[in-house]
Amino acid sequence: MKPGGPMPTRTADPRPPDKYPGRGRYPSYLAFGASGAFLMISALLLIRGVWALGDGGAAWDAYRGALGHPISLVYHGVAFIGLTWFALRLFRLFPATQPYRMGPIKRPADAVLVAGLYGVFFTVLAVGTLFLGGALL
Amino acid sequence: MVDVSRHDVVIVGGGGAGLRAAIAASELDPELSIALVSKVYPMRSHTVSAEGGAAAIARDDDSLEMHGYDTVKGSDFLGDQDVIQYFVEQAPKELTRLEHWGCPWSRNEDGSVSTRAFGGMSTKRTWFATDKVGFHMLHTLFQTSMKFGNIDRYDEHFVTKLLVDGDVCRGVAALDIRTGEVKAILGKAVILTTGGGGKVWPFTTNGNIKTGDGMSLAYREGVALKDMEFVQYHPTGLPGTGILITEATRGEGGYLLNNEGERFLITRDYGVGTKAELGPRDMISRAITQEIAAGRGVEIPGKLGRYAHLDLRHLGEEKIMARLPFVRELSKAYANVDPVHEPIPIRPVLHYMMGGVDTDIDAKTSIDGLYAAGETACVSLNGANRLGSNSLTECLVFGARAGEHATGYIKGASVGEEGPFVQQAEAEAARVDALRGRQRGGEKVSKVREDMNTAMEEGTGVYREQASMAKAVSEIAAIRQRFEQVSLDDSSKVFNTELIAALELANMLDVAEAVTCAAVLRKESRGAHACSDFETRNDTEYLHHSLVFHSPDGPRSEKKDVTLGIWEPEERKY
Amino acid sequence: MSQKLKKTFIVTRFDPDKDEVPKTQTYEIEVEPDWKILDALNHIKDTVDPTLSHRWSCRMAVCGSCGMTVNGEPKLTCKDPMSDYGDTIEVAPLANFPVVRDLVVELEGFMERFQEVKPWIMVAKERAVEEGTTQQSPDELADFKQFSMCINCMLCYAACPVVSNEPDFIGPAALALGHRYNQDSRDEGAHVRNEIFRGEGGVFSCSFANECSEVCPKSVNPSGAIQQAKLGNVIDWATSFVVKRGGDVS
């Protein structure tokens, strides 16, 4: 946090936070940031799937077939862990980021917010699994 | 050669009064150049520590006359009544202004500003922002001051001397703490707003920066210090640290108890009548002191002495969290007590100086171009005892007044010939350079300060005796001599806090001299000056302000008339 | 007197007149068990080494002067109990700031960013005192109250990895303060501050490390403020194409 202009006396350079990056809460945060990459890649894959669905049955079957490729399976295994980590940290911190009032209603209790988040998370997971498994078509 | 900068108004001190003065001057004339010089970043100023509230009439059941009478009576009839009338009229306007600037005043359900009860006030007229009122006022003022483009801040600059030639003041010499260089900051008017000098005493609510700097600066230039014998002991400080527990605890319904669990302000006669815990501070502090002296104090063996209990438990957690969250935070962190479940240990603690730089109702001193406001000044609003929550408002009312009058004054003034003022600043630079890292006798700053603290506590406590005050006078004179033999270890220029501590100690010794000198001469008991040898008020001989002037041969004292008005002095009983 | 304890303080020292880079100095002292870290530093200054420089004033956790690094964590030293630590305690200046001397850090960079967010009530037309106070319900007050509690102690800047890596980042305390005014029912300047917020070093530089809120000694929750400001900013940006913004405010 240096000033824009020159400093009137010689100063010692700023040092980074003592525990950054390997200790304290920082590793958890860095893993959270890194797992954002899985979020992006998986979102792209999802868009590709919606595209395939629009192109007709053959394209959709090919898309689902590609998902079954060993590389895809490994990726999705790792991505699942990454996204779960992302969700866990986000959900833990989420209530404190919410304002005192959301429009006309007061912020619900933290437990309610967290329960809602996990509800959405597991619902999306279940619906996605069923959909890709063909059970919903 | 010292660095010279030129402004119109130079304000020394960046707390409530200084910031208000700067904004007032800036609003009156956006073309003015205003220098705000402070030894700390403004948001560190001690205004930040005020907790309970700021007084101004706000309710239908209140009136200017009631606020005026409460203040006069609280002052034990030593407040100037013209000043008090002006103050109570301006008070609601000032607090409203602060509301417009964003101060987060606590609110009633209907959206109006909420008020609470306070000691010596006959109705609820203390505006509050939970129990961090000084903090919110200071930050509101500081942040608001940033929108004015003509306020130049000199942060972490310690003013060591007023530049006075003949009887006009035209700027200050200031030590840039960062570089160690002394600068001349010239202006056509100077306003002192540096706060009080609570650190003259050892057990105080005051922060480290409260060293009476403005009082000393004016005193050395021949301006009188007025009513210095009147220092306020706040009834409720935490034992050991002296950290303030606000009077709002009692305003919200808290009880004071002795070791028998007895509400002694009700069961015994301490002159506060049915006001009980909401009596004025001087009386409550004496009551606690007497309870402890009579063996009814609570005691932790061998540690922090005896004290009384402040009981908030009956208020309940919800009210404590809504109205007094900071008190809970402080009690937990500094006394290991949760007021929701246990009473808070408290004892009287030095809090505020009613006295200060003698000014008239326009905040003007006896030197042309020199003004003072806030705790530094004695405009005679508070007389012999200040009512809680009047001082934050005082900072606003008289800070603004000083800013306005200084602005008016400079219309017809010019700096004139700069030479003499710059030469003074150069001499000052040489003096400060000689002091930095000075090796002389074997005295240490911290030891001299400690001995001054002890002498002041023994001589000018809640109760005073002629003998102990006379002893303090001679001890302070001797300690002033010892200061000349102080050696300093730190010879570095950059951020030399030992040098600052030495300069502050010199200022505090001036304040200590004036306090003891004025105290020993007042042979009566009035307001906060409770004299064991003269237990009653004596209007025949002592219904006057006391002035102390600096001189090379020791302090010189004079009397000054009190401005009376519609309220005749009467026995002060509640 | 209670039993005194022996402690070893390892304190960072730096005097630009003498030292090329900061070094450490060790002090063996006796402390009271109920002292705070600041009490020990003042004890060292008063009785062992008067050349030690540090900032402090109120010693009651409200003036914000005495932020330092204690055993690797940013702490408000006047509120930081000795009993939380073992026999050896390391005290260093706050991280992420240039060091002026010993435990004193350069604050000018912060002061510039503080002013940048326009931390004052902005209105098109200033209200006259004669109009009286503005109505503000307890709920409207609660919308911003938490974010008005910042004491500018700088712990959040010292903990933030974005401050370390992005020189232009306005940073937690200043952004939270800007958001405090945006949330105030009396203010009309949110669209002006939102432009600053979405500019270089604004709210979108924050990567939600949440360290600011973890170390804040006053529970201001700057991280929460910044996440809210991000959402508010997106909404403000999107609606700006539909709804015309208010006139000039100051």
Image (tube, grey):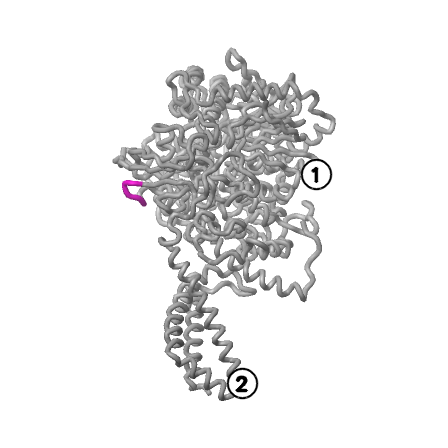
Q: Chain of mark 2?
A: A
Q: Give coordinates of residue B49: x percent, y percent.
A: 48, 39
Classify residue C237 as left or right of residue C2.
right
Of residues B2 and B340, the one nearer the viewer is: B2
Q: Give coordinates of residue B110: x percent, y percent.
A: 59, 56
Of residues B187 and C163, the one nearer the viewer is: C163
Asked if one can make out residue C128 in the rendered structure from this viewpoint, the answer is yes
Given the current orientation, which residue lies at the most extreme right position?
B412
| Figure quadrant of residue A79 | bottom left
Q: Which residues are magenta?
A: C84-88
Task: Name which residue type carries label 2.
Answer: Asp
User: At 54% from the left edge and 42% from the top edge, which residue is drawn?
Assistant: A3
Magenta region includes residue A75: no
Q: Which residue is mark 1?
A: B30
Give the vertical position of B334 relative to B367 (above or below). Answer: below
For the stretch drawn in magenta, the main secondary structure is: loop
Q: Give coordinates of residue B55: x percent, y percent.
A: 57, 40
Task: Name which residue type carries label 1.
Answer: Pro
Of residues A20 and C249, the one nearer the viewer is: A20
Of residues B151 and B439, the one nearer the viewer is: B439
Specify the label residue A55 is tagged with.
2
Q: The residue tagged with tag 1: helix, strand or loop?
A: loop
Q: The residue tagged with tag 2: helix, strand or loop?
A: loop
Give the vertical position of B499 relative to B154 (above or below). Answer: above
The residue mark sitting in front, 1 or 2, is 2
Residues at discs 1 and 2 in contact (Cβ within 8 Å): no
User: At 48% from the left edge and 51% from the top edge, which residue is drawn?
Assistant: C165
